[in-house]
């Protein structure tokens, strides 16, 4: 019988982190941005049915990059957590902070447990407030850490480059059309600096819109509404495009 | 937080088990004591006294369906509450109105609303109207033990069927038996009188506004002959809850709208207390 090689804990962790990061980097990036009336999620997704963004609760949205089966599992876990909590206490008592904490604990435990392989996912949990100051965006990398983000955040393969691009250009109080344009611009930049066109039908866009009269603020933006927003001139003089609720 | 045996703060395994899109199934696995139907009742002799909600009526019209309820809850001979709400949106395209034990009914509605919302979030699509009606049936059936002790909950479910593009009404009995009603339906203690009233007034070509008038007339007739059903309370400004579900979704008539509706009916009843007369032949 051969004796197993000794691997230092540092090395083991570094290997696991490397493994997870590589898995995440294989997927396309996505971005989450604050705009005047809420938070917008934008990503490149050829599928109409397998979503990267979804609703968790009234004011809370979820975005994920990486391995589909793993983040889908976490998404459903999050919906169950939020619904159970809202049923036990009250709808008010379901918060993004609480959810982000549970996700961080889950990812962290899986990451440092030798029995499981690390999840190859990076999550964003966002909550829209009654006013822009109340907006919260949390980024959850694969290892269970948790980062409180402001303004804009990118996750996925090319995240660092996209983040720095967004940081330079994103400002508070952008209209939805402006924020969407900026997001698409950021996503269409390749690692080598060249730009490519992302057609509207490959875009997945969703918003948490604080002006929506319903309690549930999450809404997907598709079809004509998306085309209209993409065509709208990005200048501040343009009327603010609030997604209408009658149009689905 | 909820059931965290190892207290590492991570989501327990039940949360990450794939398979079910039903919140009730999840509760049944993870926290069965929270399901209304799973509670063990102590043996009690006689009927338990608890507030009961009374009359709910529904009527369909081309383009939608109307669901309405009076505002009274009674406990024996006593009026337990004058302004109780018994009609609730179930989701964007359906509503549920409940007669029977008020406390259990409100809990059941909360769980039903959550069941529909949960499915929608997990699956990314809404249940069919039939599917929703069946879920409600299951919930009523699980309450049978309570019902046999006098704590029955009997709902009326109405919604816009997105596929068939029409308003539909489902009624239930205490055992969870479900039947689709054509045109109009009523449940609760005043339902006999409400149904009689609608039988004479209902036509299948009514407009939305005429249908809301019809259901408030029916509630007035129910309150007229059933002591447990409350009529419009002008002094306290308590009027029936009237909801309309159309292609556009669920809408509840505002306070002003339902007060105007109830007052206009009241006005006519001052001249003719028995309400509008139907043709003899």
Image: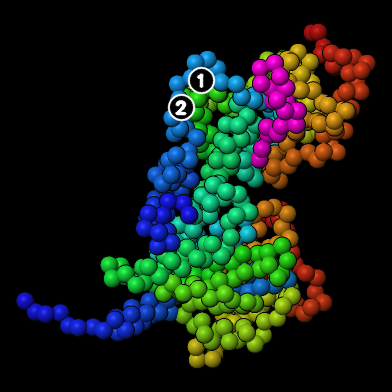
Residue at the left extreme?
A: A1
From the viewer's perspective, tell me whether residue B169 is left or right of residue B19.
Answer: right
Q: Please check the rendered image and state whether residue B199 is part of the magenta-colored stretch, yes or no.
A: no
Q: Nearer the viewer, residue B101 or A241?
A: B101
Q: Secondary structure at mark 2?
A: loop
Q: Secondary structure at mark 1?
A: loop
Question: From what the image shows, is residue A198 above or below residue A195?
Answer: above
Q: Are marks 2 and 1 in contact (CB under 8 Å)?
A: yes
Q: Position of residue B162 (x, y in %)?
A: 61, 43
Residue A235 in picture, x, y percent from top left: 77, 80
Q: Chain of mark 1?
A: B
Q: Quadrant of residue A195?
A: bottom right
* Part of the protein shown in magenta: B71-89
Label annotation for residue B224: none
Please, which chain is the residue tagged with disc 2 on?
Answer: B
- Residue in front for this viewpoint, B237 or A37: B237
The residue singled out by tag 2 in the image is: B41
Residue B149: mark = 1
Tell me whether marks 2 and 1 sit on the same chain: yes
Along the horizontal axis of the image, is B65 left or right of B137?
Answer: right
Q: Position of residue B238 (x, y in %)?
A: 81, 31
């Amino acid at each position: 019988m051969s004796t197993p090689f000794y691997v230092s804990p540092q090395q083991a962790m570094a290997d696991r982190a490397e493994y997870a990061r590589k898995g995440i980097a294989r997927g396309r990036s996505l971005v989450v941005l604050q705009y005047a009336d809420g938070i917008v999620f934008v990503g490149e997704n050829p599928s109409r049915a397998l979503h990267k963004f979804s609703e968790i609760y009234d004011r809370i949205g979820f975005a994920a990059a990486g391995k589909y089966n793993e983040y889908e599992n976490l998404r459903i876990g999050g919906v169950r957590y939020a619904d159970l909590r809202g049923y036990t206490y009250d709808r008010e008592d379901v918060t993004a902070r609480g959810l982000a904490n549970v996700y961080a604990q889950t990812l962290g435990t899986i990451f440092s447990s030798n029995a499981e392989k690390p999840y190859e996912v990076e999550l964003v949990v966002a909550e829209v407030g009654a006013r822009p100051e109340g907006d919260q965006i949390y980024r959850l990398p694969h290892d269970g850490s948790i980062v409180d983000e402001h303004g804009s955040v990118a996750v996925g393969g090319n995240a660092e480059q996209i983040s720095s691009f967004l940081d330079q250009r994103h400002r508070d109080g952008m209209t939805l059309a402006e924020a969407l344009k900026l997001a698409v611009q950021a996503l269409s930049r390749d690692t080598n600096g060249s730009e490519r066109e992302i057609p509207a039908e490959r875009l997945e866009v969703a918003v948490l819109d604080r002006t929506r009269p319903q309690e549930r603020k999450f809404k997907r933006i598709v079809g004509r509404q998306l085309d209209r927003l993409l065509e709208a001139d990005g200048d501040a003089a343009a009327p603010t495009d609030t997604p209408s609720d009658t149009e689905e | 937080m909820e059931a965290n045996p190892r207290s590492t703060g991570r989501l327990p395994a039940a949360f990450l088990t794939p398979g079910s899109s039903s919140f009730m199934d999840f509760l049944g696995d993870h926290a069965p004591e929270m399901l209304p139907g799973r509670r063990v009742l102590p043996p009690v002799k006689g009927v338990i006294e608890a507030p009961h909600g009374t009359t709910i009526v529904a009527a369909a019209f081309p383009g939608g369906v109307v669901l309405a309820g009076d505002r009274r809850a009674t406990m024996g001979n006593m009026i337990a509450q004058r302004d109780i709400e018994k009609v609730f949106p179930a989701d964007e395209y359906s509503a549920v109105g409940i007669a029977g034990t008020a406390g259990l009914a409100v809990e059941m509605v909360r769980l039903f609303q959550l069941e529909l919302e949960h499915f929608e979030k997990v699956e990314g699509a809404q249940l069919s109207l039939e599917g929703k009606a069946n879920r409600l049936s299951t919930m009523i059936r699980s309450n049978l033990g309570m019902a046999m002790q006098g704590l029955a909950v009997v709902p009326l479910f109405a919604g816009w069927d997105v596929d068939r593009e029409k308003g539909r009404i489902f009624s239930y009995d205490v055992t969870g038996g479900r039947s689709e009603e054509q045109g109009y339906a009523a449940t609760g203690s005043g339902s006999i009188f409400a149904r009689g009233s609608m039988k004479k007034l209902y036509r299948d070509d009514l407009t939305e506004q005429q249908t809301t008038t019809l259901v408030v007339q029916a509630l007035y007739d129910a309150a007229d002959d059933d002591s447990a059903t409350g009529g419009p309370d002008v002094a306290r400004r308590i009027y029936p809850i009237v909801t309309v579900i159309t292609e556009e979704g669920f809408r509840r008539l505002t306070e002003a709208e339902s007060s105007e509706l109830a007052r206009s009916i009241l006005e006519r009843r001052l001249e003719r207390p028995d309400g509008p007369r139907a043709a003899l032949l």
